[in-house]
Amino acid sequence: MFFLCVSLSFTALEVECLSSDGQALLSLLSAADPYYKKSSPVLSSWNPSNPTPCSWQGITCSPQERVISLSIPDTFLNLSSLPSDLSSLSSLQLLNLSSTNISGSIPPSFGSLTQLRLLDLSSNSLSGPIPSELGKLTLLQFLFLNSNRLTGAIPQQLANLSSLPLPPR
Ligand SMILES: *[C@@H]1O[C@H](CO)[C@@H](O)[C@H](O)[C@H]1NC(C)=O
Ligand SMILES: *[C@@H]1O[C@H](CO)[C@@H](O)[C@H](O)[C@H]1NC(C)=O
Ligand SMILES: *[C@@H]1O[C@H](CO)[C@@H](O)[C@H](O)[C@H]1NC(C)=O
Ligand SMILES: *[C@@H]1O[C@H](CO)[C@@H](O)[C@H](O)[C@H]1NC(C)=O
């Protein structure tokens, strides 16, 4: 795939390929209906033919053009699950998907977003347990999971997040 993009870029067509961070973000649009995509000021800026997602609304990139922030609260994504593709955004520091109408469970693979400082998945319809893998997010300072349908206990592993202000037990 990468080779194909490189070779095409030497033709007059000037085909540019979206970076892998951009590809991962597009997984959030899988359920969006075309009309909504066009009318939403945020989602209509998510142009798959851009080389990087850095100009898309709700996205902030590092100087290396890696996505460090994804913040699109109050955008109706209507997803039946949180795409695990997002866990490949390995430079992500801030993720705010509050009030985006996402259901399903929190993917354990989110534990690989080790640069995350702020995670807000509040006010959705998420269900199931909080994965213990989130305990690997050692830089996490803010975790908002309220107003969902999560069940079970807060995993023991999260108690080891030294930067996280948890109520005393
Ligand atoms: C989500 O659902 C609402 C209400 O049914 C609808 O208005 C909106 O267009 C949908 N959004 C997407 C992204 O499909
Ligand atoms: C996420 O976005 C919502 C809506 O703008 C905001 O109220 C909330 O504070 C944000 N979350 C964090 C942790 O900053
Ligand atoms: C939320 O998404 C579901 C599809 O997953 C859709 O049926 C429903 O209408 C959406 N709700 C709102 C308030 O947009
Ligand atoms: C928490 O950290 C302590 C000390 O580093 C370690 O002994 C313990 O196994 C950790 N607990 C969990 C649940 O990860």
Image: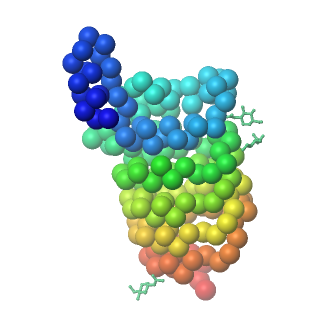
Q: In this rendering, is residue 90 above or below 45?
A: below
Q: In this rendering, is residue 29 above or below 98?
A: above
Q: Is residue 106 visible?
A: yes
Q: Number of numbered discs present? A: 0
Of residues 75 and 128, the one drawn nearer to the viewer in this rendering: 128
Q: Is residue 99 visible?
A: no
What's the image's color scheme?
Answer: rainbow
Q: In this rendering, is residue 60 above or below 133?
A: above
The x and y percentages for residue 63 are 28, 40
Q: In this rendering, is residue 38 above or below 168?
A: above
The image quadrant where one finds the N terminus is: top left
Quarter location, residue 76:
top right
Residue at the image point whose x is 39% and y is 42% from the top: 21
Residue at the image point whose x is 35% and y is 36% from the top: 19
Of residues 13 and 150, the one drawn nearer to the viewer in this rendering: 13
The x and y percentages for residue 116 are 43, 58
The x and y percentages for residue 133 are 49, 70
Residue at the image point whose x is 64% and y is 69% from the top: 129
Quarter location, residue 32:
top right
The image quadrant where one finds the C terminus is: bottom right
